[in-house]
Amino acid sequence: MQHPTRTIRDKVFLFIKGLAMGAANKVPGVSGGVVAFVAGFYEEFIYSLQKFNLKALKLLINGRFSSFYRYINGKFLVFLILGMLFSYFSISKLLDYFIDRKELYVWAAFFGMIIGSIYYIAKDFHHWNQRTIFAAILGILFGISLSFLSPAKENDNLIFVFLCGIISVSGMTLPGLSGSFILILLGNYVLLLVDSVNALYDTFADIFSGDFSFINNAKRIHTLKILVVFTLGSATGLVTLSHLLSYVLKHYKHITTATIIGFITGSLGVVWPWKKTIYRMNDEGAVMLDSAGDKIIQNYQRYLPDPATSETWIAVFFVIVGILILLSLDWYGKKQRRYV
């Protein structure tokens, strides 16, 4: 699965793929794992994460850093993870901006991309039988059930935050399962993906400007502590889930793929474009705001589009654009394989 001689072009594309995964993980209802699956590096991603094991730890302890880097497929992971991290402070901010102002069209584009990804994954899958059909149906039912769950209240208990990290990172390793949407259901989306990220961003800004007064800011320090625990939970989840998934992919690949196809299909209900955002309200009936001044999302109320409005047809256009993006990836992949 490793590619020891990656060119500069490959590294740039890996960074861009990391940007796409990071942005997808930030958006409720969209899975970074779908990006990995459709872009053709899902299995390499899982198997590379699997390399974080006792052997890797021994290489680190013995100071064999170059061997450790090669063993974990560092040339692949470093540029991918750099793209994800950069995305959280750039592209994800841009997505937040457009979701706030053109929410319907953003969701429509994502809806189209997920339809395209279902086609992309299913078109070359020729192993349908009773077991894989049953697995796909289970995946669909589980995906649909997510959209009917009600969110919990925010909880900053560090043990719960650590568990949130383990669970939310599933969006990277399980295509179709949105880690950010799960955080909404757990009640900690704003705390972990908005407030804590903003606290880290503000802290870096203060450090670069020579201002260390944040050390005396108890709220900032507590939020940074939450981010550290969440990150540790995410790292733990990535490694543990990758070991589980690599085993499942190796021994039950067809059933796993069928389940993923079903699950992504079921998740279409989560990213249905025509929905009204329901914001969290306080006891006085006013919309609650996070530390950045943004409205806190509680859930979504879905409705059928009105074919008489131009807004509906613009949204349909963006659905088609989303589908075409995935079809163009398919075309590009076939073109690249012809020249290999």
Image (cartoon, helix red, strand yellow):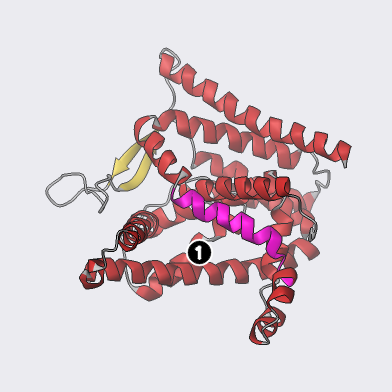
Residue for point 58% across, 30% down:
322
Q: Is residue 168 one of those drawn in magenta?
A: no
Q: How many numbered discs sit on the rendered protein?
A: 1
Residue 334 relative to residue 291: left or right: right
**Residue bearing the label numbered 1:** 167
Query: Residue lying furthest front in this view?
Result: 210
The picture quadrant where one finds residue 227 is: bottom left
Name the dominant secondary structure of the magenta segment: helix
Which residues lie in the magenta part? 71-89
Q: Establish if 68 lies above or below 330.
A: below
Mark 1 secondary-structure assignment: helix
Q: Is residue 82 one of those drawn in magenta?
A: yes
Q: Is residue 35 visible?
A: yes
Residue for point 70% across, 53% down:
42
Q: Name the spot of residue 99 as percent of width and height, x first.
A: 40, 36
Check the picture and name the quadrant holding the C terminus: top right
Q: Name the spot of residue 26 as percent of width and height, x first.
A: 46, 49
Q: Name the spot of residue 9 as percent of width and height, x first.
A: 72, 45
The picture quadrant where one finds residue 287 is: top left
Q: Name the spot of residue 311 as percent of width and height, x first.
A: 42, 19
Residue 295 relative to residue 275: left or right: left
